[in-house]
Image: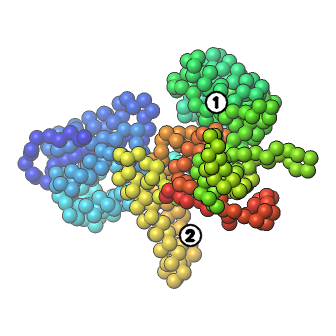
């Protein structure tokens, strides 16, 4: 909450300080406090009464920032209540790097007591005059341009670092110190132990249970999860490869595992799962056990593989469960479907559904629902704006160059809104998805239980209708997707 001072005479000089720092990993930077002190001195020197101090730490103001600014929102509330006449800042980029936010403030100045934005270096933007508004817009445009330049410089630096094999930063990778290069011997031994055990036939789930029972902590000091260990064992960083935008470069840090070990684990991942093995055979998993139902009788579809015979190969498949463990009749037992194409179809459908921004509303924690709904509304507004641009181009209101420029801006705004929505997806189930990953990329290395949880987030029921055997081909399988019905929660 902002600090509000005692009542003071209204002289159209009531001043609110706003300070902001873009990045502060420690959360203890002196920078914000220095900004506040500078503003306080400026207000005192001018005899302006302070009615509030608002600060946001470790939060950017550019279009590339996805974090909300709670203190900034509190400042806007104070302006709406008529408490603020002057916003005092050290420089314009501390307040805005997005033109649409400034335009909102300009409109507020038309209906509230707000008069101007003031910087401590003596620049004043009078929001009651056309000249002042024009100057403020120019200042924000310059800030936006600088933000774009910074973004390009950062991306160039990241690419250069990747080409040189340097660490990308972020959280400490397991097995290495905080610099991402120096080995941490105790953790190196754990990674090599886990790789050896996995290659030799143990399951990820079994290894994770053992690590947690032994009290071996993860890099963040928490218990292990199958998804985390699976990701580590298959991450190419551990064989000395730096990845960047799909390209690979020799890493500057030492490898922990060999290329041969990585290939063995990757191959096993294609056939093995985190669940139990059938005695004498390869590990089996059935991704859709639970939501899959028989379209003939409504009973449950369960995994029931067909064994190899002289004239046919073994096959993973789903079947309608005819009886329960006590011999009671629970289904017709007459509907079967090959597992591989069915699971592929549902997987692709689920990953596609997660591209829909409205999914985030359902996945948001209850306390964030209001925020997420607002973000969805904003996304839809930006999407509609992009559609209006197409109409303007078609009717001749925009020429080709104007349309291309406006379309680029609108698409970037839509992507910004989509990224903001992704932050509010269910944290417990989607914790595997790193900031630099898509859900599809996380899915490729995730364990069975995590994939099933993701499916359950959006799928209510999968109905497998009876189909004529051998009719229809799909993705190289004798399989017809038209007989599969997915009922969505969203």
User: How many marks do you count on the picture?
Assistant: 2
Q: Position of 24 compared to 48: left or right?
A: right
How far across and down, in percent of the image, does residue 300 sit? 61, 51
Is 16 left, or right, of 212 in this rendering? left
Q: Is residue 328 visible?
A: yes
Quarter of the image containing the N terminus? top left
Number of residues whose C-alpha sits closer than 10 Å to that of mark 1, classed few (under 14), some (14–19) or many (20 or more): many
Give residue 433's quadrant in the image: top right
Q: Vertical placement of 153 versus 126: above or below?
A: above
Label 2 or label 1, whichever lies nearer to me, is 1
Kindly identify the residue that appears in the image at 73 percent across and 33 percent down: 277
Q: Secondary structure at mark 2?
A: helix
Which residue is the extreme one toward the bottom?
Answer: 395
Label 2, residues with CA under 10 Å away: few <14, some 14-19, many ≥20: some
- Look at 36% across and 38% down and name the residue there: 57
Q: Residue at x 59, y 47 (%)?
A: 290
- Residue 434 image point, x, y percent: 56, 41
Whether residues under marks 2 and 1 lie with C-beta atoms below 8 angstroms apart, the answer is no
Residue indicated by mark 2: 404
Quadrant of residue 46 in the image? top left
In this picture the colour scheme is: rainbow
Q: Residue at x 24, y 52 (%)?
A: 77
Marking on residue 205: 1
């Amino acid at each position: 909450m902002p600090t509000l001072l005692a009542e003071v005479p209204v002289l159209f000089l009531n001043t609110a300080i706003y300070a902001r720092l873009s990045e502060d990993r420690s959360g203890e930077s002196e920078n914000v406090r220095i900004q506040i002190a500078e503003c306080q001195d400026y207000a005192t020197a001018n005899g302006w009464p302070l009615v509030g101090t608002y600060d946001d730490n470790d939060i950017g103001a550019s279009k590339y920032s996805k974090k909300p600014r709670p203190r900034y929102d509190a400042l806007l509330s104070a302006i709406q209540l008529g408490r603020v006449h002057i916003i005092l800042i050290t420089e314009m980029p501390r307040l805005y790097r997005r033109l649409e936010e400034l335009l909102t403030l300009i409109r507020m100045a038309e209906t509230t007591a707000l008069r101007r934005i003031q910087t401590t270096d003596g620049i004043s933007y009078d929001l009651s005059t056309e000249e002042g508004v024009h100057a403020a817009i120019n200042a924000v445009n310059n800030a936006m341009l600088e933000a774009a330049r910074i973004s390009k410089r950062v991306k160039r630096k990241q690419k250069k670092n990747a080409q040189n094999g340097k660490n990308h930063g972020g959280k400490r990778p397991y097995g290495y110190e905080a610099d991402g290069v120096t080995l941490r011997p105790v953790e190196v031994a754990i990674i090599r132990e886990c790789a050896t055990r996995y290659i030799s036939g143990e399951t990820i789930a079994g290894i994770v249970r053992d690590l947690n029972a032994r009290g071996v902590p993860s890099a963040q000091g928490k218990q292990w999860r199958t998804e985390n260990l699976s990701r580590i064992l298959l991450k190419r960083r551990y064989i000395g490869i730096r990845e960047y935008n799909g390209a690979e470069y020799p890493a500057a840090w030492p490898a922990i595992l060999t290329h041969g070990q990585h290939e063995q684990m990757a191959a096993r991942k294609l056939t093995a799962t985190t669940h139990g093995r059938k005695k004498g055979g390869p590990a089996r998993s059935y991704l859709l056990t639970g939501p899959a139902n028989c379209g003939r009788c409504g009973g449950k579809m369960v995994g029931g593989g067909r064994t190899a015979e002289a004239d046919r190969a073994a096959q993973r498949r789903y079947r309608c469960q005819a009886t329960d463990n006590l011999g009671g009749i629970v289904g017709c037992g007459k509907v079967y479907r090959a597992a591989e194409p069915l699971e592929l179809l549902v997987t692709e459908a689920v990953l596609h559904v997660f591209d829909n921004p409205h999914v985030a509303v359902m996945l948001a924690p209850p306390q964030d629902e209001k925020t997420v709904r607002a973000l969805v509304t904003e996304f839809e507004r930006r999407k509609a704006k992009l559609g209006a641009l197409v109409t303007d181009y078609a009717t001749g209101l925009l020429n080709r160059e104007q349309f291309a420029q406006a379309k680029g801006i609108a698409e970037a705004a839509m992507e910004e809104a989509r990224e903001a929505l992704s932050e509010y997806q269910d944290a417990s189930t989607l914790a595997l998805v790193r900031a630099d990953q898509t859900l599809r990329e996380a899915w490729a290395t995730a364990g069975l239980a995590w994939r099933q949880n993701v499916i359950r987030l959006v799928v209510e029921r999968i109905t497998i209708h009876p189909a004529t055997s051998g009719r229809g081909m799909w993705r190289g399988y004798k399989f017809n997707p038209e007989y599969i019905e997915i009922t969505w929660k969203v």
